[in-house]
Image (spheres, coloured by chain):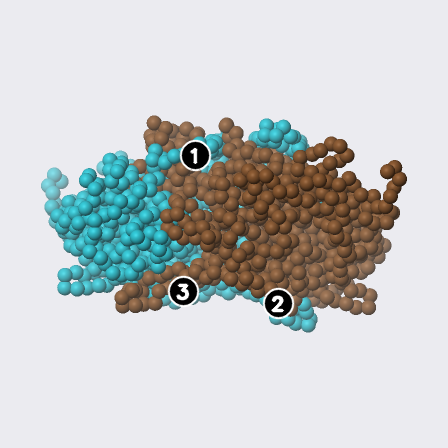
Chain colours: A cyan, B brown
């Protein structure tokens, strides 16, 4: 056995149990994100399947989740305490042969130690960008003599520091003798730091955009083209001119005069938090709070993922995650016409997740969840504190005063917040799942960060611009749309779910039934075929996830959850455009598809320089029967026409999608929440201090509060 | 002079200065709500204008606000510290000659002590209902032998307590030999307390609706008709049958098993609140917080009113208030077809305002504002603690991480909340103005309270109902729409304002300008004529208040504020219905009218049994030029198709209208907010405690937070 016979294979796993030699481990939960060891083992096994000496550039190594057919019985067994079926641990490995454009996709079985499949992808398939790459590209282009020669024409002040934001190269299908955009390339936009403060590494360079935009081939790592961008009101490109001085626009506190009259506001939980956390896997956390019970995973592409969400022991969601986003820009001029970011597909919500810090990103009593991703060598990279978990007060949840007795009952709302934040070069997204006390689950997106700016002729600063807003002298921020796609794999009281929508419509006048023309009713339409669906505010259209096989014990209605979706303007780019073809989710507020394992990403698995045809619109076109096992894709977004107030860093633009029980319970599920009480709130009345007045009530007359009736 | 010569007149006021005999007082601010003394003086002066012995039933005595022509110069003088012009104090007095339907409207000049006008109103004009009246009506009808005879047919259990919710009698124009609905009447709905707990005065009687509905003449205070309501699926009314037992559905805590695992969450401000309050009048408060500076008034009809709102010394709003609301119901069957409540016009947000109590309605460090209204005798009634003022954390306001230096700057948001709550018999509205750190002002409505229920045949409990939702055995909650109208009298950087809307629209494909079909632009439409206007989500239509005479110093755009309006389904009742005619604001999301003094209420001044023709739709039909001095009326609402989860008390349904600066500042106005810091947040990391792990960051590594850069 000392003799190496054939290809090396790691010791096999048995029944989902790792046995490294003798030492045995407990089975890994099938929904546990890959552990650091599993990541390195995946890349090792993959490498062993190739001839010795082959070099790799790994792009992503993530858990290949079990099929729903495998997993549902496992989860049912887990909830009923039965014996757990064994499920192999698999990983999805995406990699390049180093220094080539040969993109591969492999499935590694960590249980058997075998590579189950391994295929070369393409054409028109490119992996996401990553930090390593982006920093390398910036270095290369700034050192490039041709780029330097172009920059020289700007006659920048002595000592000016030029920086670059490499961007993904949105496809436009253009092919000519020297270039075809199937090449994996990056379009790089140039900026400079404040020349009067060049040593400040955090100077806001977006206030100093430059008209030069090199294109770098990410295989050869060479500059293959240098674009000069239009800086006027139309598409005309002028020869480069000497740079004209403009003031800086800094956001870092030491370069701003800060207000001094905002006093501290602290959240205190004297008895600690109301939630508990346990590890269901090395990299997976199970949270329990106020009848909610769910598993939290984290991966490179989606970041935070929720699994197996229950309320009071009843299943609600099989899987919930942000599936992708697309941000197409309004400026039709080359090279800006290609600006459409897919920040999950092109980069990764997990890969770009912030390390959240106490005192910075959350307030109160906070638990932090960490994750792990992979580097280019297929080794694990720890991502500390990528999710913060805390409770927040949400004001009054319900109140009623009986005017006859003047007794008021007031109950406050509370949310459990799971927040994660990603930074994709200039821009930030603050994403959270918020659970509340009345069975609502809200997905919240806060868009912030810095607008992607471009240069404008200084003399046009006060001229209205057709494609955007001037946010600083000589700085244009183009309008852009944000589209988010939330993937909802429902399990409302079990797997037999259906998507329906309800419309409120007037009843025609009728001498008997509607003699005064005031009547209206609600009409239900079940969605039977996969497809895209629109909201209709004029009909108060509401989409619902129902379980036709479970009826409300009181009123007999099918139990369900409704979805509050903020109405959005769909994509403005025309249907022949690459923007439209690539963002397969940006044309409909709702898509319904039949569940298919692996169909997780609304814009397709490989969005970088994609051509379309691989996302949710294409899947929906199968026109499958979705009366059983539907997946709901909720699209929402905004048209961001920049305000000058959005610069240098924009105040959050907030969007919420809300899931609310509808005939799921038999009454208000928050009736059992203890009433608001001064004993527990410990509020402070200011009237006495502020104006010597005491109008009563402010100094803790507990008799005034409903809660007191129970505490007596 | 000891001889009474002619009509008694109170000692005159001089230059807005009260001189009661010798003792002089300081001038009253023209926007100061009436003081208790001014209210009693108003009714006294009014009474003196009538023959001795005339008896009155006062309905409302409120400040008659000065005309804009008078007030603008006063406010300008106040802000510039110039000498203040003197403006007479006037009151609007609405009253009946006691025990008649003779409704009068008078203007009393408190400065001169003269009644300036006094006129009899009508026909089709009726004053609001009030608590005194509602309690009296309930008493009368329950004592009425005919009503008791009908109730007897229900054979209710021994000792059952029957209660009644008197409702306003929505007009339907029906006239017959014995009745014409120009009579001022109330339609009363009957309920009973849980017969097994009759002594519990706070038993939720809405779980026990009865099919009997008496109509009471509020002039004669007699029952003039007893309606029996349909309890099936159609309009057929069955003879009264013996009541069938159903279980109770109680909301008071001592009748529910309360959850015990929600731990206290407290808001602590160790250095106190960041706002200051000063009295600008006896009943008026001026608040200053984070560059915001505004006056808060309170009146019987609108409740909380904001005047003269400034930010950083720049005017934004002349006057802001909720103007009215309308809640039409879906059930077309008699008498339900008349259910359309105007809770401000028919009752009054001030009259029905809750007395907010510490520990109950707000959290943290709270200042309470009180108000005053009038009773039937024209005497002042104190309304303590009708507005609570406090600060709340709102999560992250802006964040950016420079990926090159990994430095994160995070700033948290904070709101100053002015909250008031009204109870209109079964239902509650929680209304607030929320000011934030980046110049946003949000108006928030939270709808809660108890659904207005009606009886349903017990055997139909599990049958879908065409007009609503079954929320309890034998209990139907009809669907209804909520329409709110927020009146916005703008003053963005001065009085020369204009309303415009911006649409985002695709640019047609063009080989030169838009070769890839990706371009779009924003088109502006100024509103020049008064009228009603729609949202258009498909064009991302955004309404803006701009000041064409003030340009942004950086980009030259007209300074402005945009309005985020939640899209709503407009009224479903047809345009010939009384619902539609009366709710003059429920058909358009935006109305723009030319400012006219006294045009404050979107549904007209007298909504009770109104016929229409006296509200914003009628004013808009004047088709006036609104390029100067426009008033903006923002409508929003929901179609409330009840969920069983909305009973017995519904979790809040929240709606927000947001005003955001757009090219009003020259950059993000919150860049000067100190970054989030552990020094001031004092957050608590739970990882160590919960799982012994310390992933770093959670235990106050201050270096991790942007703020630390400034504190070093």
Marked residue chain, label 1: A
- Label 3 sits on a secondary structure element that is strand
| Circle 1: element type | loop
Q: Nearer the viewer, mark 2 or mark 3?
A: 2
Spatial CA span between label 1 and label 3? 52 Å
Q: Which of disc 3 and disc 1 is earlier in sequence?
A: 1
**Residues at discs 2 and 1 both on one chain:** no
Q: Position of residue A397 (x, y in %)?
A: 56, 44
- Residue B254's spot in the image, x, y percent? 65, 38
Q: What's the residue at 34%, 33% (across, down)?
A: A254
Task: Mark yes or no: residue A471 visible.
Answer: yes
Q: Nearer the viewer, mark 2 or mark 1?
A: 1
Front residue (pair B539, B597): B597
Which label was assigned to residue A531?
3
Asked whether disc 1 touches disc 3, contact meaning CB atoms under 8 Å apart, the reply is no
Q: Which mark is residue A358?
A: none
**CA distance separating discs 2 and 1:** 54 Å
Number of marks drawn: 3
Instruction: Give coordinates of residue B360: x percent, y percent.
Output: 61, 37
Foreground label between 1 and 3: 1
Q: Residues within 10 Å of mark 1 (few under 14, many from 20)?
A: few
For residue B574, which numbered disc appears in the image? 2
Residue at image point 32% right, 44% down: A423
Residue drawn at (69%, 53%) of the image: B346
Q: In the image shown, does B245 or B199 lie closer to the viewer?
A: B199
Residue at 43% in and 38% down? B412
Which disc, if any, is residue A259? 1
Q: Is residue A307 visible?
A: no
Which quadrant is home to the N terminus of chain A? top left
**CB within 8 Å, label 2 to label 3:** no
Disc 3: host chain: A
């Amino acid at each position: 056995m000392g003799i190496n016979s054939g290809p090396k294979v790691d010791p096999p796993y048995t029944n989902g149990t790792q046995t490294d030699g003798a030492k045995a481990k407990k089975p890994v939960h099938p929904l546990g994100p890959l552990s650091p060891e599993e990541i390195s083992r995946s890349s090792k096994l993959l490498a062993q399947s190739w001839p010795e000496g082959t070099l790799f550039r790994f792009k992503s190594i993530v858990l290949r989740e079990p099929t729903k057919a495998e997993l549902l019985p496992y989860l049912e067994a887990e909830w009923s305490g039965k014996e757990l079926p064994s499920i192999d641990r698999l990983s999805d490995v995406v990699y390049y042969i180093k220094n080539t454009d040969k993109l591969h996709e492999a499935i590694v079985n960590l249980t058997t130690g075998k590579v189950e499949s391994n295929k070369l992808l393409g054409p028109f398939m490119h992996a996401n960008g990553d930090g390593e790459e982006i920093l390398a590209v910036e270095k290369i282009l700034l050192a490039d003599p041709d780029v330097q020669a172009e920059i020289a024409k700007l006659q920048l002040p002595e000592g000016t520091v030029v920086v670059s934001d490499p961007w993904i190269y949105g496809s436009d299908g253009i092919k000519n003798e020297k270039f075809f955009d199937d090449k994996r390339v990056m379009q790089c936009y140039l900026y400079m730091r404040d020349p009067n403060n060049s040593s400040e590494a955090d100077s806001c360079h977006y206030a100093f955009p430059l008209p030069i935009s090199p294109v770098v081939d990410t295989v050869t790592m060479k500059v293959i083209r240098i674009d000069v961008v239009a800086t006027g009101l139309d598409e005309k490109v002028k020869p480069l001119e000497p740079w004209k001085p403009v003031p800086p626009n800094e956001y870092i506190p030491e370069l701003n005069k800060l207000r001094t009259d905002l006093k501290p506001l602290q959240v205190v939980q004297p008895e600690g938090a109301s939630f508990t956390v346990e590890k269901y896997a090395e990299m997976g956390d199970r949270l329990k709070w106020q009848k909610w019970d769910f598993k939290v995973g984290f991966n490179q592409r989606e970041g935070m993922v929720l699994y197996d969400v229950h309320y009071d022991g009843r299943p609600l969601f099989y899987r919930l995650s942000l599936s992708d986003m697309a941000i197409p820009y309004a400026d039709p001029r080359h090279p800006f016409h290609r600006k459409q970011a897919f920040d999950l597909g092109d980069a990764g919500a997990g890969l770009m997740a912030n390390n959240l810090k106490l005192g910075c990103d959350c307030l109160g009593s906070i638990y932090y969840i960490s994750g792990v991703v992979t580097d280019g060598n297929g080794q694990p990279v720890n991502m500390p504190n990528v999710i913060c978990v805390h409770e927040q007060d949400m004001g009054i949840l319900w109140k009623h005063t009986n005017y006859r007795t003047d007794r008021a009952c007031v109950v406050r709302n509370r949310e459990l917040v799971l927040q994660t934040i990603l930074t994709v070069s200039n821009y930030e997204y603050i994403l959270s799942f918020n659970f509340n006390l009345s069975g609502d689950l809200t997905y919240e997106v806060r868009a912030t960060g810095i607008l992607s700016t471009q240069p404008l002729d200084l003399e046009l600063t006060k001229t209205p611009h057709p494609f955007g807003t001037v946010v600083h002298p000589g700085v244009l921020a183009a309008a852009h749309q944000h589209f988010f796609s939330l993937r909802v794999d429902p399990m409302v009281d079990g797997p037999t779910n259906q998507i329906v929508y309800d419309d409120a419509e007037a009843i025609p006048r009728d001498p008997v039934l509607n003699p005064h023309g005031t009547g209206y009713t609600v009409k239900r339409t079940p969605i039977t075929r996969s497809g895209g669906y629109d909201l209709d505010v004029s009909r108060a259209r509401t989409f619902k996830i129902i379980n036709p096989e479970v009826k409300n014990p009181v009123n007999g209605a099918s139990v369900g959850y409704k979805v509050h979706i903020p109405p959005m303007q769909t994509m403005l780019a025309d249907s022949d455009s690459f923007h439209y073809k690539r963002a397969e989710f940006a044309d409909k507020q709702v898509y319904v598809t039949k569940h298919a394992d692996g169909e997780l990403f609304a814009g397709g698995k490989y969005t970088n320089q994609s051509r379309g045809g691989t996302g949710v619109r294409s899947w929906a076109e199968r026109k499958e029967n979705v009366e059983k096992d539907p997946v709901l894709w909720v699209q929402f977004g905004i048209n961001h026409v920049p305000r000058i107030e959005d610069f240098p860093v924009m105040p959050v633009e907030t969007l919420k999608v809300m899931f609310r029980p509808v005939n799921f319970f038999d009454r208000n599920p928050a009736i059992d929440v203890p009433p608001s009480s001064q004993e527990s709130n410990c509020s402070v009345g200011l009237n006495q201090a502020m104006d010597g007045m005491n109008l009563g009530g402010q100094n803790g007359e507990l008799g005034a509060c409903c809660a007191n009736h129970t505490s007596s």
